[in-house]
Image (cartoon, rainbow, N blue to C red):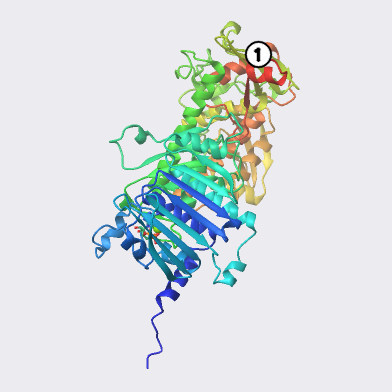
């Protein structure tokens, strides 16, 4: 006699429930998804006792007739795969949140369920009572159009599972997360959410924009603007088959975990490391290390380009072309940050026809005499001018020796700006942005300025070190990208002996290292001679500069392909931001009024300035109304 037995349907449902229904929040998720798939405009969610006592979901969707109200309790019964469920391709074009026909029977097998439903065409609805998978009662009833599902005593027949549930606070937190997700994914859907008869949210239908909802969950107590993500393809509907939209919080409101970044693909809330990584990459240079952005990101793409049938809780998916999705997210986020910079510039400096015209971009400033690109390196940094020789281009002429680490090819001789005249290339009357006037310095660190917008006044507070760091970073990046890293010859080249490890790193990465504007030649054995250093930090000890760069090149060899590219980009940012940090005006440095104006001018001309390269914010604005409030003035 065969030892193998077919499981009873009841047992099969319980086993499925083990995967599909992990905790009360899973029930809420499945019921909410069903309501959304049923086209509901309003959903009411009531929770008692962290969900184990009661979960009730009421919707005004299409409802079910008497037959369907019974059929939905059968395993693998679904209305969502269209007519021909024998067609295996049907799974490749799933457009609804549900598709397996598993949720209702799974829930019903581990709880007491009452289902009441009516369609528009039926005068009476149907009520079905089920107890741990067994149908107890079916009868007709008067009820509203739509569906009400009540779940009581969840896991009442599975004491072990019930024991594994966490504290009521944790379970409620998970439920709330699910409700938030679907509130965001369906911003036209009205949602009422009550816990133990307390109304937590009562959000009307049809009125909210996505931005309203993101603000509601993330930015209720702040007037900080959100960063809209709008992929360029979103702007022209015929353009593309993938769109990326959403809102992020400003980078300083980032978190150590990725749980505050909500990701959606075709309206489905999912967890996806690749997408989260792409958002972080798009924000590189704005986010603090190890932090993740917060906000909601929506990717919409053809249903056949994504496999949703890869995880029992439908919270993971597989992209057909993950790399191209990654790239698109990175570029959408970068674009959003560019727009965000423009906006910030606009709100601080007001509208000015020169703003963002491109003609005032930093690196295009020319030193009148040499015609070279100038980084405006120092701000009263004590610069030992004896150390440098101002012969400029000489440093870049290849020495002809085989062992020379040849610097990049420069199209023009490189400036050796007189260090004690920091970024002064302009006449003073040219400096003042009419709309933003420096008032003074606070703690020799924060510039206090008054911004005028017509009749309106704002107090603008700027971190002088951080903003200058950002400006220099942007310039250095631009120089590096155009292989025009400004370098300065040392009057007294610096001899040094490297450890064998450092010498090896130098040897291995000679080309890349020379691109940073440092000229090093071998001098026999592990001895080297530094002949030129990056202009922007030429006031520093050359040995310190070289070892700093070498440290960034140490560590295991990088892998190939995309991973390597990303690591290279991170290293580049790290090296350039460290240079910018060392070259920037210091905290505690007293500035003259003219210097303050110069800094504002640089800020106005810079492509980006809202955050330092390490992700710290650099500017705060207070409206006159806000300040009046501090003093109870009306
Ligand atoms: N709130 C509802 N309104 C209208 N019909 C519903 C509702 N809930 C369930 N149904 C019907 O019951 C069927 C079974 O629901 P169930 O959640 O078990 O499966 P599914 O949604 O099709 O797939 P999945 O298991 O992936 O969720 C659905 O296909 C739908 O036709
Ligand atoms: Mg379902």
User: Hey, which quadrant is residue 348 in on the image?
Assistant: top right
Say above or below: 52 vs 221.
Answer: below
Q: Quadrant of ligand 2?
A: bottom left
Residue at x 67% of width, y 26% of height: 465
Give the camera-side residue of 132 and 434.
132
Give the camera-side residue of 127 and 149.
127
Disc 1 under 8 Å from ligand 2? The reply is no
Q: Secondary structure at mark 1?
A: strand
How packed mark 1 is, by other alpha carbons closer than 10 Å (few <14, some 14-19, many 20 or more), is: many
Q: How many marks?
A: 1
- Taking the view exactly as shown, the residue that stands out farthest to the top is 429
From the viewer's perspective, is 62 left or right of 456? left
Q: Is residue 261 visible?
A: yes
Image quarter of the C terminus: top right
From the viewer's perspective, is 92 left or right of 322? left
From the viewer's perspective, is 262 left or right of 7? right
Image quarter of the N terminus: bottom left
Give the camera-side residue of 556 and 233.
233
Expressed as whole percent of the image width and height from the top left, the position of residue 111 reads: 50, 66
User: Hey, which quadrant is residue 307 in on the image?
Assistant: bottom left
Expressed as whole percent of the image width and height from the top left, the position of residue 340 reads: 50, 28
Give the camera-side residue of 143 and 16.
143
Q: Which residue is mark 1?
A: 438
Say above or below: 29 vs 296.
Answer: below
Say above or below: 342 vs 367.
Answer: below
Q: Is residue 519 visible?
A: no
Expressed as whole percent of the image width and height from the top left, the position of residue 256 reads: 62, 46
- Taking the view exactly as shown, the residue that stands out farthest to the bottom is 1
Expressed as whole percent of the image width and height from the top left, the position of residue 505 reads: 59, 48
């Amino acid at each position: 006699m065969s030892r193998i037995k077919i499981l009873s349907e009841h047992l099969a449902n319980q086993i499925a429930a083990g995967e599909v229904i992990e905790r009360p929040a899973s029930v809420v998720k499945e019921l909410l998804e069903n309501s959304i798939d049923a086209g509901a405009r309003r959903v009411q969610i009531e929770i008692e006792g962290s969900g184990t006592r009661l979960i009730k979901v009421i919707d005004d969707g299409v409802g079910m007739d008497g037959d369907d109200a019974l059929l939905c309790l059968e395993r693998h019964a679904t209305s969502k795969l269209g007519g021909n469920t024998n067609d295996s391709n049907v799974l490749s074009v799933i457009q609804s949140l549900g598709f397996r026909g598993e949720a209702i029977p799974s829930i019903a097998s581990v709880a007491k369920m009452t289902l009441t439903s009516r369609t528009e065409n039926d005068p009476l609805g149907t009520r079905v009572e089920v107890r741990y998978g067994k149908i107890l009662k079916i009868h007709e009833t008067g009820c509203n159009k739509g569906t009400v599902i009540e779940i009581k005593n969840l896991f009442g027949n599975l004491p072990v599972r019930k024991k594994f549930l966490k504290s009521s606070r944790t379970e409620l937190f998970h439920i709330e997360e699910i409700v938030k997700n679907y509130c965001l994914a369906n911003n036209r859907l009205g949602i009422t959410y009550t816990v133990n008869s307390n109304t937590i949210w009562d959000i009307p239908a049809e009125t909210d924009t996505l931005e309203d909802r993101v603000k509601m969950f993330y930015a209720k107590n702040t007037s900080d603007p959100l960063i809209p993500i709008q992929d360029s393809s979103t702007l022209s509907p015929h353009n593309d088959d993938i769109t990326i939209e959403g809102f992020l919080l400003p980078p300083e409101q980032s978190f150590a975990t990725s749980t505050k970044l909500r990701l959606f693909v075709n309206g489905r809330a999912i967890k996806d490391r690749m997408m989260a990584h792409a958002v972080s990459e798009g924000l590189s240079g704005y986010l603090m290390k190890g932090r993740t952005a917060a906000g909601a990101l929506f990717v919409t793409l053809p249903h056949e380009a994504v496999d949703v049938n890869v995880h029992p809780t439908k919270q993971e998916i597989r992209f057909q072309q993950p790399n191209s999705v990654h790239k698109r997210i990175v570029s959408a986020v970068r674009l959003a940050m560019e727009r965000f910079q423009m906006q910030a510039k606009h709100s601080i400096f007001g509208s000015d026809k020169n703003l963002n015209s491109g003609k005032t971009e930093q690196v295009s400033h020319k030193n009148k005499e040499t015609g070279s690109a100038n980084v405006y390196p120092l701000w009263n940094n004590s610069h030992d001018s004896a150390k440098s020789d101002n012969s400029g281009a000489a440093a870049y002429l290849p020495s002809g020796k085989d062992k020379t680490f040849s610097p990049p090819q420069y199209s023009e001789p490189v400036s050796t700006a007189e260090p004690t005249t920091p970024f002064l290339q302009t006449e003073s009357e040219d400096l003042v942005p009419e709309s933003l006037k420096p008032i003074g310095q606070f703690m020799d660190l924060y510039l206090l300025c008054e911004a005028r917008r017509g009749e309106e006044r704002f107090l603008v507070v700027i971190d002088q070190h951080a903003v200058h760091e950002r400006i220099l970073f942007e310039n250095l990046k631009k120089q590096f990208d155009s292989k025009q890293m400004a370098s300065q010859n040392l009057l007294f080249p610096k001899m040094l002996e490297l450890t064998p490890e450092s010498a090896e790193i130098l040897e291995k990465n000679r080309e890349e290292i020379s691109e940073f504007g440092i000229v090093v030649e071998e001098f026999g054995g592990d001895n080297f001679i530094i002949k030129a250093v990056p202009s922007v930090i030429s006031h520093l000890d050359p040995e310190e500069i070289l070892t700093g760069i070498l440290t960034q090149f140490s560590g295991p060899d990088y892998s190939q392909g995309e991973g390597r590219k990303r690591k290279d980009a991170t290293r580049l940012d790290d090296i350039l931001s460290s240079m910018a940090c060392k070259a920037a005006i210091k905290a505690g440095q007293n500035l003259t009024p003219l210097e303050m104006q110069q800094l504002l001018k640089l800020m106005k001309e810079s492509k980006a300035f809202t955050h330092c390269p390490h992700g710290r914010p650099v500017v705060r604005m207070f409206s006159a109304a806000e300040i009046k409030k501090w003093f109870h003035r009306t």
